[in-house]
């Protein structure tokens, strides 16, 4: 049985005092004693004219003088009506005591036992969680420093020596870099690696694709031959001395149609972001600047992009290595590498970051294909787009959206110059440029020598990656994919690209949607109630925010579309997975991707968004992806205390960011709470006097999110008091311990927090009735205020 001090906030019994300290003596009587009391049995007598109250007003002498019967001993018995009245009063009194005891037992004890442990959770998921919690800091046993090292101490054990200590540091760092998307990929990996023999045809193909991707031995045996065979199919190239001088636009059309490769510009399908008519959304072909392979950066002085000089040498070395692996003669390779680098540099000048194009009004410019042809004549736009969207009839009067028209115009001029008048045009530089881009597209399906070459380049680009990230350069993605991701993760990402609908179907069948929807409903309700407690800068701000929040309805989704097994089997019926050739399977994947673009343009159906984890607001509809509700952050067999302490907090924090992105300027409470929590932190550390506005807002967001999650959990307990336990922890204690571990996963807002979010437990526990025990740190002479933030 738990102590009253462990009762969650909001669940305190209405009779809050203990029985031993009751002021009323009758409350100490047991029912057995009460029922032993007997009622008077004397016979009734004639009623006297005075009432009992009036008689008691008379002094004894006066009674004796005025009432002869008073002086007769044989007749001193009280009148019968008085005796009956006393009996009735006693009966009413006893009934009141009895009813009070019934109320006490029914109401007080029921509330006192709100925290009902139904036993330990022994599911496999809970067993793994128990191991994790046992290795983690407990805020109630380490109140002085748990919030400093909440993800497992960063300080290795003194018993470890040398390389063991270094390995311990690396293990801790690796553990802290796991994020929610990685956990989602690991969950999907388990679905793909399961040996369910009842899987549909589409699911079996997805599993086969994933397995062949993991088979690096077969890739190494195949070597460069699959790609050389593809080059021969495309007419050869001048690098090997065998090239059929194929037409520039015909090669470009084939790459766009069959291999989802766009060397000189990007092509995708989406709606017009400037269309606010509210009518049915129409999709358009979008033409954007390309992801150039050469590392570039934006020059704020010249307002142009430029090649990063210190990367030129390693970039040239990587290109030379690729050509050597593909059998290029040593003497001629450098000519082609130089031409590729020079052409890339010329194209890079017109590439611009998103913020610059937005400021210049260069986004979503609508042109007909005929107008585009007139502005950029080097590309046969109608032929290329008809090839890419072959099942969709296109005419020269159809509209497309341009997102960097100056680049497209400059690109056309550069291509024309290289075709006709450039000194290196005889070496087929445009054709080589396109095939090297195709090589980059197919890198995941080539042997380890190619991936090692990409790895080496990404290591060199590491220090300059931040300089090119602003341009959305593909080289930045290279660094992440090849330098840090293990093979299984790369294979999962590739499988998701082509089989997202299949994975979404498997996902939908394995996620407990009922428990997740209940948590979402309780969290959203608590978010709305929390906002009523804020002090707003003015009445208009309050009305605006409350209208926005009150009108929001949540929608729990796994995908943007739902497909049955039969529909998925039909969609993937043309794909034949070769269990011995991932290269062949990858070519079919690229074809699938292009077919998806066609389907999106023709049918207006988005593909599954299986990797989404961030809630989004579309009008008044709050979209909450199912990708959040997976282990280790959520599981239907977990105690609800753990689900609310982890996933409830994360969801509440995301919702506050989505619904109130600029609340700092609208509410006085945000500033006050942020500074209050920071002051508490300073009482046990040596922090500065104040923190910036952005940090104050994030402190308020995360502090409020923890309050919201706790309040939502309490609402859940009111409906269903019983909850399971892990490691014998009480409800509230397990809630806070589970929350303390959520910080071990990468948080996209972590850079805005001036301390480990687990310290928020200390701020919440300033109100001692919320927590199992007070979090007092004996190491500090300063004491917390008794008032909460």
Image (tube, helix red, strand yellow):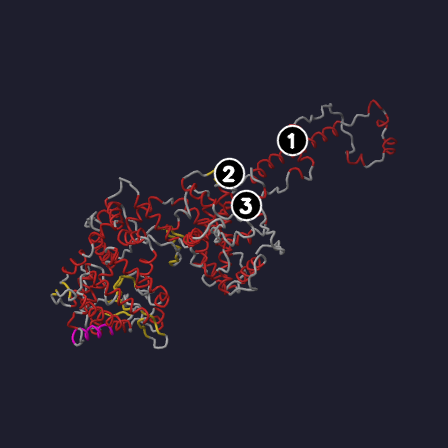
Q: What's the distance in space between the residues labelled 2 and 1, CA to CA?
A: 28 Å
Q: Earlier in the sequence, mark 3 or mark 1?
A: 3
From the top left corner, tell me how far across and down residue 432 is, in percent. 19, 66
Q: Which residue is mark 1?
A: 30
* Left or right relative to 489: residue 577: left
Q: Residues within 10 Å of mark 2 (few under 14, many from 20)?
A: some
* Residue at numbered disc 2: 117
- Image quadrant in which the N terminus is located: top right
Which label's residue is closer to the chain start, 2 or 3? 3
Disc 1 residue crowd, few under 14, some 14–19, many 20+, Cα 10 Å: few
Which disc, if any, is residue 8? 3
Q: Is residue 533 left or right of residue 508?
A: right
Disc 3 versus disc 1: nearer the observer:
3
Residue 204 falls in image quadrant:
top left
Let me know if residue 477 is in the magenta part: no
Is any atom of residue 568 visible in this view? no
Q: Residue furthest left?
A: 244
């Amino acid at each position: 049985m738990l102590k009253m001090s462990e009762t969650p906030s909001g669940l305190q019994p209405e009779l809050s005092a203990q029985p031993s300290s009751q002021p009323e003596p009758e409350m100490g009587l047991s029912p057995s004693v009460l029922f032993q009391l007997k009622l008077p049995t004397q016979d009734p007598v004639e009623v006297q004219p005075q009432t009992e109250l009036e008689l008691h007003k008379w002094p004894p002498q006066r009674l004796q003088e005025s009432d002869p019967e008073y002086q007769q001993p044989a007749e001193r018995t009280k009148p019968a009506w008085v005796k009956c009245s006393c009996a009735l009063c006693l009966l009413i009194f006893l009934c009141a005591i009895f009813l009070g005891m019934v109320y006490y037992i029914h109401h007080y004890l029921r509330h006192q036992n709100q925290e009902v442990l139904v036993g330990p959770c022994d599911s496999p998921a809970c067993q793994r969680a128990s191991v994790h919690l046992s290795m983690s800091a407990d805020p109630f046993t380490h109140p002085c420093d748990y919030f400093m090292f909440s993800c497992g101490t960063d300080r290795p054990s003194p018993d470890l020596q040398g390389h063991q200590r270094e390995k311990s540091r690396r293990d801790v760092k690796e553990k802290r870099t796991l994020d929610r998307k990685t956990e989602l990929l690991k969950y999907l990996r388990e679905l793909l690696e399961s040996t369910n023999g009842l899987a549909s045809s589409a699911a079996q193909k997805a599993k086969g694709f994933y397995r062949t991707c993991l088979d690096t031995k077969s890739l190494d045996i195949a070597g460069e031959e699959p790609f050389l065979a593809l080059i021969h199919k495309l007419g050869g190239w001048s690098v090997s001395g065998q090239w059929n001088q194929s037409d520039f636009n015909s090669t470009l059309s084939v790459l766009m149609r069959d291999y989802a490769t766009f060397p000189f510009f990007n092509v995708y399908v989406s709606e017009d972001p400037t269309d606010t008519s509210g009518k049915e959304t129409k999709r358009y072909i979008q033409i954007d600047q390309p992801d150039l392979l050469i590392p570039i950066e934006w020059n704020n002085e010249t307002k142009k992009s430029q090649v990063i000089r210190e990367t030129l040498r390693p970039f040239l070395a990587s290109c030379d290595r690729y050509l050597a692996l593909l059998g290029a003669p040593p003497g001629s390779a450098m000519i082609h590498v130089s031409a590729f680098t020079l052409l890339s540099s010329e194209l890079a000048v017109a590439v611009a970051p998103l913020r610059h194009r937005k400021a210049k009004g260069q986004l979503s410019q609508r042109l007909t294909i005929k107008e585009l042809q007139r502005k950029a004549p080097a590309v046969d736009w109608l032929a290329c787009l008809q090839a890419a969207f072959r099942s969709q009839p296109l005419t020269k009067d159809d509209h497309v959206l341009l997102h960097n028209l100056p680049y497209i115009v400059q690109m056309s001029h550069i291509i024309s110059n290289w075709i006709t008048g450039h000194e290196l045009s005889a070496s087929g530089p445009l054709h080589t440029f396109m095939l090297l881009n195709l090589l980059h597209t197919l890198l995941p399906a080539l042997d380890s020598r190619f991936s090692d070459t990409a790895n080496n380049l990404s290591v060199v680009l590491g220090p300059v990656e931040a300089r090119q990230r602003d341009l959305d350069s593909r080289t930045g993605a290279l660094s992440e994919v090849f330098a840090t991701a293990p093979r299984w993760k790369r294979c999962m990402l590739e499988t998701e690209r082509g089989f997202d609908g299949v994975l979404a179907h498997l996902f939908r069948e394995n996620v407990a949607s009922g428990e997740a929807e209940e948590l979402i409903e309780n969290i959203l309700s608590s978010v709305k109630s929390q906002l009523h407690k804020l002090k707003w800068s003015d009445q208009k701000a309050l009305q605006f925010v409350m209208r926005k929040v009150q009108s929001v309805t949540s929608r729990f989704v796994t995908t943007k579309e739902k497909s049955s097994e039969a529909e998925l089997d039909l969609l993937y019926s043309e794909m034949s997975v070769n269990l011995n050739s991932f290269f062949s399977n990858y070519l079919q994947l690229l074809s699938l991707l292009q077919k998806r673009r066609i389907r999106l343009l023709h049918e207006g159906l988005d593909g599954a968004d299986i990797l989404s984890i961030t809630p989004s607001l579309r009008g008044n509809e709050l979209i909450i992806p199912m990708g959040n509700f997976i282990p280790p952050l959520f599981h239907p067999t977990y105690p609800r205390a753990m689900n609310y302490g982890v996933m409830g907090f994360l969801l509440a924090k995301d919702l506050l960011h989505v619904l109130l992105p600029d609340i700092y300027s609208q509410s006085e409470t945000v500033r006050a709470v942020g500074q209050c929590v920071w002051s508490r932190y300073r009482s046990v550390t040596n922090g500065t006097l104040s923190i910036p506005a952005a940090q104050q807002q994030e402190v308020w967001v995360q502090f409020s999110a923890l309050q919201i999650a706790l309040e939502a959990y309490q609402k859940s307990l009111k409906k269903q008091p019983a909850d399971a336990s892990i490691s014998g922890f009480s409800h509230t204690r397990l809630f806070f311990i589970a929350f303390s571990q959520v910080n071990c996963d990468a948080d996209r807002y972590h850079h805005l927090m001036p301390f480990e979010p687990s310290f928020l437990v200390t701020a919440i526990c300033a109100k001692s009735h919320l927590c199992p025990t007070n979090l007092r740190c004996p190491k500090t002479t300063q004491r917390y205020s008794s008032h909460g933030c």
